[in-house]
């Protein structure tokens, strides 16, 4: 956040410049980057709940809106990410507000000029949203086309011009902040190539579909839990289909909104739990419709509130009471693990310690500054842009302001994802499950990183 540099994965390309600028603005008040990011996550989470309510009410009715808002509020991973320093609740809020505005641009009760004005507003919102989350350029493009094809050619062209201008402004500003257009585009190209080579069907063939489906199923399953049967019911129930097909434009709108990111995740890449937040708002609306259809289908309408209560309490219990990944206990365990790592490393001398971190470099640097003896040398690197290198451990290679002494050094792997290769590594397990891998070696040796994640001590 403090040093915008997508080329160096701060943050990863294309950098999300508008998001970074908002964080910097909040940081002026909090003087704590982590707290600033957490505040944005919480506000975006609250906004998502409200926006899902508004969208569901516009698409259907008040009952669907209330239930959809409850379902998204208690979705397990959404609840978890709403209180941590990650940008994914913002993804949910932005995709929902854009969908809401685009649906309003299709309102048949409005005049042609009224719908055209709403499309212009929706296009401006989408153009700005791309500067916060660039994946929305892909995810919402078909939905925008769906709305634009129902406008006049002049309005559609003007709307496209607004989107292009706002995206161009974001690219120009990002390039300016990142040292120029060439450097910025190179960073984006490197990131795209990394995704293609490691995850997408373009670089890996059909096996990529299986891998991505597995990850997508895992992320959706742990986010939705008890919502899954209701979503399935909406898709297979004759009663639900009969109701949904009364308004084919609405059905097509929801399908386009959900299937676009779904296809991207299956064929290209789905990175982690938060990625599914582009789908979550729409899926919770489908789940609400499934609950309504189920109560009608069994001809027991009074059971509707009990169905909703059971799902809400079930998902809330998983988050609050279970030990599943991304639950409240799991997050607390992770936080305690960081504290335990710091307590363990507090006994190490900065002059004879080298911390190695790839994906968690920013996190490691933030917390290592709290060590009582000062920040030990932190070797942070980009596993994508710099996946292989060899670095001598001698003091001659240390920076001018980095502490370095004696003939031996403790090399510490901070990230759990890093692979300790070769001999000489000792694994230290913390009480709450986190770990450090440590090698005590002469400074005459070198550290070699291969394939981004493999770390080995070599002569």
Image: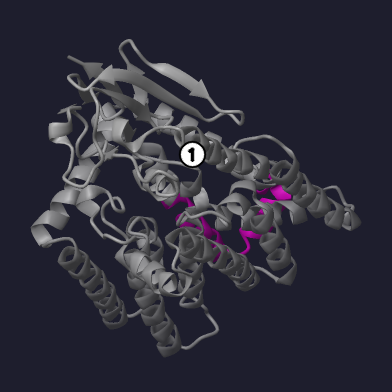
Query: Is residue 61 found inside the magenta-colored segment of the image?
Result: no
Q: Position of residue 131 (x, y in %)?
A: 32, 66
Please identify the quadrant where the C terminus is shown: top left
Residue that sits furthest to the front in the current view: 406
**Residue 108 can be seen in this image:** yes
Mark 1 lies on a secondary structure that is helix
The structure's colour scheme is one colour
Name the residue carrying label 1: 342
- The span shown in magenta is 233-260
**Quadrant of the rendered structure where residue 83 is?**
bottom right
Task: Give the quarter of the image for residue 28.
Answer: bottom left
Residue drawn at (35%, 77%), measured in percent from left and top?
124
Q: From the viewer's perspective, is 451 left or right of 367?
A: left
- Say if the magenta span includes residue 240: yes
In the image, residue 294 sits, relative to residue 50, either above or below, namely: above
Q: Compared to 7, does 200 lie above or below?
A: above
State the quadrant of the N terminus: bottom left
Extreme residue in the top direction: 423
For image coordinates 27% across by 49% down, the residue present is 9
**Camera-side residue: 409 or 116?**
409
Residue 326 in sight here: no
Dominant secondary structure (helix, strand or loop) of the stretch shown in magenta: helix
Q: Position of residue 307 (x, y in %)?
A: 82, 50
Spot occupied by residue 113 in the image (x, y as percentages of width and height): 40, 89
Q: Quadrant of residue 436?
A: top left
């Amino acid at each position: 956040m403090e040093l915008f540099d997508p080329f160096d994965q701060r943050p990863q390309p294309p950098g999300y410049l508008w998001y970074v600028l908002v964080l910097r603005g909040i940081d002026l008040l909090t003087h704590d980057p982590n707290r600033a990011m957490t505040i944005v996550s919480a506000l975006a989470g609250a906004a998502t709940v409200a926006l899902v309510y508004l969208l569901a009410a516009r698409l259907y009715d008040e009952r669907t809106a209330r239930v959809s808002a409850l379902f998204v509020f208690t979705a397990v991973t959404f609840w978890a990410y709403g209180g941590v320093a990650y940008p994914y609740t913002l993804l949910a809020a932005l995709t929902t507000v854009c969908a809401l505005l685009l649906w309003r641009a299709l309102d048949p009760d409005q005049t042609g000029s009224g719908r055209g004005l709403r499309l212009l507003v929706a296009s401006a919102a989408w153009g700005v949203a791309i500067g916060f989350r660039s994946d929305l350029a892909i995810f919402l493009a078909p939905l925008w086309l769906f709305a634009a094809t129902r406008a006049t050619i002049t309005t559609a062209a003007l709307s496209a011009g607004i989107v292009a201008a706002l995206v161009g402004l974001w690219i120009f500003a990002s390039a300016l902040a990142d040292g120029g257009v060439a450097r910025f585009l190179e960073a984006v190209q490197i990131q795209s190539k990394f995704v293609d080579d490691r995850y997408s069907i373009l670089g890996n063939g059909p096996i990529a579909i299986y891998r991505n489906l597995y990850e997508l199923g895992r992320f959706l399953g742990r986010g939705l839990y008890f919502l899954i049967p209701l979503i399935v019911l909406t898709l297979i129930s004759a009663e639900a289909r009969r109701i949904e097909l009364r308004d084919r434009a609405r059905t097509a709108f929801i399908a386009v909104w959900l299937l676009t990111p779904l296809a991207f995740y299956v064929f290209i890449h789905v990175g982690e739990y938060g990625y599914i937040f582009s789908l979550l708002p729409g899926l919770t609306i489908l789940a609400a419709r499934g609950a309504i259809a189920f109560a009608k289908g069994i001809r027991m309408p009074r059971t509707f509130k009990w169905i909703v209560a059971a799902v809400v309490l079930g998902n809330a219990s998983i988050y609050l009471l279970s030990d599943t990944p991304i639950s409240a206990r799991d997050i607390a365990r992770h936080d305690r693990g960081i504290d335990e790592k710091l307590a363990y490393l507090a006994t190490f001398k900065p002059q004879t310690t080298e911390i190695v971190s790839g994906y968690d470099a920013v996190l490691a640097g933030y917390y290592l500054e709290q060590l009582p003896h000062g920040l030990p040398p932190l070797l942070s690197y980009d596993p994508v842009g710099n996946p292989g290198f060899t670095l001598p451990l001698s003091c001659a290679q240390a920076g001018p302001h980095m502490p370095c002494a004696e003939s031996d050094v403790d090399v510490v792997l901070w990230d759990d994802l890093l692979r300790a290769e070769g001999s000489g590594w000792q694994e230290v397990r913390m009480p709450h499950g986190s770990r450090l891998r440590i090698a005590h070696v002469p400074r005459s040796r070198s550290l070699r990183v291969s394939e981004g994640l493999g770390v080995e001590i070599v002569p």
